[in-house]
């Protein structure tokens, strides 16, 4: 079967660092994506990993371990506007993207 | 700006009354997808088009159909909406090039309510 697990909800303080974990079990793997989704809005692309290791993009970094079926998204210097859901998605086939249910992040002042 | 546009943002229909949701894109992407997303759940892929080739997911109900008359437009038709079809419907596009991974670009979604 296809399965992606993320924590349902996390809370952090403005200015802090937060790590959102994602574990996956899929029939195929052609890369892992992280998306940000504000309530009632479209998911927007944040980062992509296909090889093991860390990818850094400004305040956001994403890590992948294919052997462990594990990824995390690291958000630094948290801002209030970072309050959103963060979706982990695996590209399991050429056109097949499997999404996790998302982690709802609340940033507190 | 190149983008994915969904109309309408909010749609209300009656139980059993056919409804069509539309999606257009200016990105000239060759793949278009339709997802259903219920509250606090993961987006669930219903089907996708690669150019004119239609691909249905095995568990997508027959009640859901799609049309892609040209590269820019794609429609989702729900023939007889039931209460369980109330959800956010997301359209997404991507360009598939060999093995390079392209992220999906999403529209803002259409929130469908069933009375």
Image (tube, coloured by chain):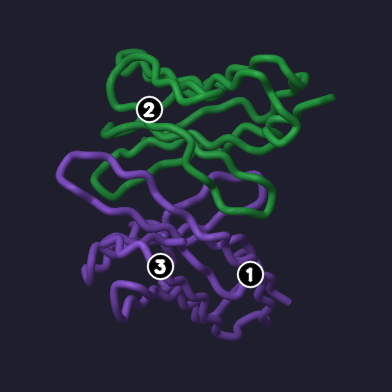
Chain colours: A green, B purple
Foreground: B82 or B28?
A: B28
Q: Residue B68: percent from the left, percent from the top?
A: 33, 76
Numbered circle sitting on residue B9:
1
Tell me the quarter of the picture where residue A8 sits.
Answer: top right
Instruction: Determine the secondary structure under disc 1.
Output: loop
The residue at the point 65 percent across, 75 percent down is B11
Relative to A30, is B86 on the left or the right? right
Instruction: Determine the secondary structure under disc 2.
Output: strand
Question: Do marks 3 and 2 both belong to one polypeptide chain?
Answer: no
Q: Is residue B72 above or below residue A55?
A: below
Tag in front: 3 or 1: 3
Q: Is residue A57 above or below residue B80?
A: above
Identity of the residue furthest to the right in this view:
A109
Q: Residue A85: percent from the left, percent from the top?
A: 63, 38
For marks 2 and 1, give the CA distance. Answer: 34 Å
Q: Chain of mark 1?
A: B
């Amino acid at each position: 079967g296809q399965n992606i697990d993320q924590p349902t909800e996390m809370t952090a303080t403005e200015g802090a660092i937060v790590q959102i974990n994602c574990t996956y079990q899929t029939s195929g793997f052609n890369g892992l994506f992280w998306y940000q989704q504000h309530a009632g809005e479209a998911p927007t692309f944040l980062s992509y990993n296909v090889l093991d290791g860390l990818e850094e993009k400004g305040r956001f970094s994403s890590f992948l371990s294919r052997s462990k079926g594990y990824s995390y998204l690291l958000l630094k210097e948290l801002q209030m506007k970072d309050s959103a859901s963060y979706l982990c998605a695996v590209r399991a086939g050429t056109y097949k993207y499997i999404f996790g249910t998302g982690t709802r992040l609340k940033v507190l002042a | 700006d190149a983008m994915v546009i969904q109309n309408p943002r909010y749609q209300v229909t009656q139980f059993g009354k056919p409804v069509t949701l539309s999606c257009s894109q200016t990105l000239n992407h060759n793949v278009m997808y339709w997802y259903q997303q219920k509250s606090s759940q993961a987006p669930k892929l219903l089907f996708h088009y690669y150019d004119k080739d239609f691909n249905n997911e095995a568990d997508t109900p027959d009640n859901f159909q799609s049309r892609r008359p040209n590269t820019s437009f794609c429609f989702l038709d729900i023939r007889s909406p039931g209460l369980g079809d109330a959800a956010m419907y997301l359209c997404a596009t991507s360009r598939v090039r060999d093995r390079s991974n392209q992220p999906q670009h999403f529209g803002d979604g259409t929130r469908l309510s069933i009375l």
